[in-house]
Image (cartoon, rainbow, N blue to C red):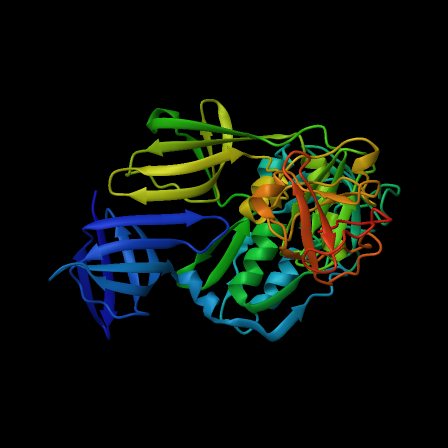
């Protein structure tokens, strides 16, 4: 196997063998590569990496280091990353999501960038039949593997050859969904519409909540496609087209080509009946469920309460599902990209990431039906610690998730003893430490939000402390538990 790098000065090509290479491709980040070669290439030069004279891709040089007298080390990003240097808007960009689809938002983001959406993005082709059932084009009976996943309550818009009484201006609600069909209504939970003709259409899912972007085109596109849509994103560099979908290509069975399989099973906590999501600030919060066993997540990309609430609803639905992940090692001669679907050991998987070297290729695979934890990954962080049950775990005051050391601890208050509970309190607080209290609801009376108080009476046995108005002063008599997520 041979890798080469090529760049042009005018019409003159310069090519050299790559001595060492690592290529990282992930569906939720810009693809990156590190190479070593004897060519002296300038920063921001466009280069082509070629594998075995057949598989090529276009990259931009971002960093260079002289390893020794003759070998240079370069850090590259794929050509699509030129979008990272362009802004969506000079300042804050707010999308009014009334009727906007993922496609329309991405189109707006790309306006003026020189890039367009490629045809591969139109993976959601369906046929409307008279019984108001939608099937994927070509007679497939699996909407999931055909490229889209629908849930009851989703909103969609249509384009293409649309049969009456449907049109391209109306937002429709999914009122029935299975692996093979969906039904649409004019209202949420309403009666399904019966088509009076047959037509071939593109079904685009609408974005449910408002999103705010700052600055770079790449950040906006990655958020709406990868974070919100949970889809793969890739560039067709020669045509300057950006493509996205639930899978960019489908491969056959690779079982016989796998050298090593490392299974990783991530079981998300079960039994929770209430979810709270915190956004960029504590005043941005959303809640789903009405039970007494609570789990709290932090998603700093959530900029509105509606967005946090929508995410809380999705998390509540996905809690308890098991996301099966595996890392497969295969021959370096294979051509597998992020966003592919493959068969392994009789099961169909989605390829989340690919790491390629001279020696081998490691691919991270997971279930085709992705949970919100797969889609958001490390961006969705649980507020760690114990979760209470019963009356003390109610959202409006009382015991909340404990954990996250520092002033951001979520706390509970005992008005009978005037104490504040923080597990392992001695690890985080000492007498005379200064603290402030915040809450999107109310802080415990008579405390004033944002006012500096002093820690006293730290008790490692009961995991509690008290507060005073001055260092070493009299403990304050707490008269209420407060409400909301108290920090």
Q: Nearer the viewer, residue 146 or 467?
A: 467
In this rendering, the answer to whether 270 lies above or below 84 is above
Tell me if 15 is positioned left or right of 484 in this view: left
Tell me if 339 is positioned left or right of 136 in this view: left
Residue 117: image quadrant is bottom right
Task: Please tell me which residue is depicted at 33% across the width and 49% down the height of the picture.
Answer: 23
Residue 81: image quadrant is bottom left
Q: Nearer the viewer, residue 404 or 210?
A: 404
Number of marks in the rendered image: 0
In this rendering, the answer to whether 200 lies above or below 68 is above
Whether residue 158 is visible: yes
Tell me if 169 is positioned left or right of 340 in this view: right
Q: Position of residue 325 (x, y in %)?
A: 50, 32
* Residue lying at the far top of the rendered structure: 346
Whether residue 53 is visible: no
Q: Position of residue 92 (x, y in %)?
A: 64, 72
Q: Nearer the viewer, residue 38 or 391?
A: 391
In this rendering, the answer to whether 255 lies above or below 381 is above
Tell me if 212 is positioned left or right of 293 in this view: left
Q: Position of residue 432 (x, y in %)?
A: 63, 55
Q: Quadrant of the N terminus?
A: top left
Q: Position of residue 69 (x, y in %)?
A: 11, 62
Task: Please tell me which residue is depicted at 60% across the width and 49% down the height of the picture.
Answer: 430
């Amino acid at each position: 196997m041979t890798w080469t790098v090529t760049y042009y000065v005018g019409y003159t090509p310069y090519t050299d063998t790559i001595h060492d290479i690592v290529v990282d491709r992930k569906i939720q980040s810009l693809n990156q590569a590190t190479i070593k070669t004897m060519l002296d290439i300038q920063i921001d030069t466009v280069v082509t990496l070629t594998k075995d004279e057949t598989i090529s891709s276009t990259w931009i040089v971002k960093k260079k280091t002289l390893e020794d007298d003759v070998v240079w080390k370069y850090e590259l990003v794929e050509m699509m990353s030129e979008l990272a240097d362009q802004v969506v808007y000079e300042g804050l960009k707010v999308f009014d999501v009334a009727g906007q689809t993922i496609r329309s938002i991405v189109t707006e983001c790309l306006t003026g960038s020189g890039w367009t959406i490629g045809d591969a993005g139109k993976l959601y082709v369906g046929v409307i039949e008279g019984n108001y059932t939608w099937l994927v084009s070509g007679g497939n009976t699996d909407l999931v593997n055909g490229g889209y996943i629908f849930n009851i309550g989703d909103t969609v818009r249509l384009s293409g050859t649309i049969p009456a009484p449907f049109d391209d201006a109306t937002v429709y609600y999914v009122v029935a969904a299975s692996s093979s069909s969906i039904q649409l209504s004019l209202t949420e939970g309403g009666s399904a519409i019966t088509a009076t003709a047959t037509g071939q259409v593109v079904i685009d899912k609408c974005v449910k909540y408002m999103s705010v972007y700052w600055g770079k085109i790449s950040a906006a596109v990655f958020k709406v496609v990868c974070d919100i849509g949970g889809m793969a994103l890739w560039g067709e560099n020669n045509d300057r087209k950006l493509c996205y979908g639930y899978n960019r290509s489908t491969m056959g069975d690779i079982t016989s080509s796998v050298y090593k399989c490392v299974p990783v099973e991530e079981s998300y906590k079960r039994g929770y009946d209430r979810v709270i999501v915190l956004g960029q600030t504590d005043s941005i919060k959303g809640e789903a469920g009405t039970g007494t066993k609570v789990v709290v997540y932090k998603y700093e990309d959530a900029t509105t309460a509606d967005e946090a609430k929508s995410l809380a609803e999705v998390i509540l639905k996905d809690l308890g599902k098991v996301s099966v992940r595996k890392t497969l090692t295969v021959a370096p001669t294979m051509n597998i990209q992020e966003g592919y679907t493959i068969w392994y050991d009789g099961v169909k998987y989605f390829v989340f990431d690919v790491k390629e070297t001279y020696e081998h290729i490691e691919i991270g695979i997971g279930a085709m039906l992705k949970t919100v934890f797969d889609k958001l990954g490390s961006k969705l962080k649980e507020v760690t610690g114990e979760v209470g049950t019963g009356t003390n775990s109610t959202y409006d005051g009382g015991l909340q998730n404990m954990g996250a050391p520092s002033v951001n601890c979520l706390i509970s208050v005992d008005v009978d003893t005037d104490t504040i509970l923080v597990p392992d309190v001695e690890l985080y607080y000492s007498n005379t430490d200064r603290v402030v209290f915040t809450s999107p609801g109310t802080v415990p009376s008579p405390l004033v939000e944002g006012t500096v108080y002093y820690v006293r009476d730290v008790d490692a046995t009961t995991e509690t402390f008290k507060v005073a108005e001055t260092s070493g002063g009299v403990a304050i008599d707490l008269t209420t538990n407060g409400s909301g997520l108290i920090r």
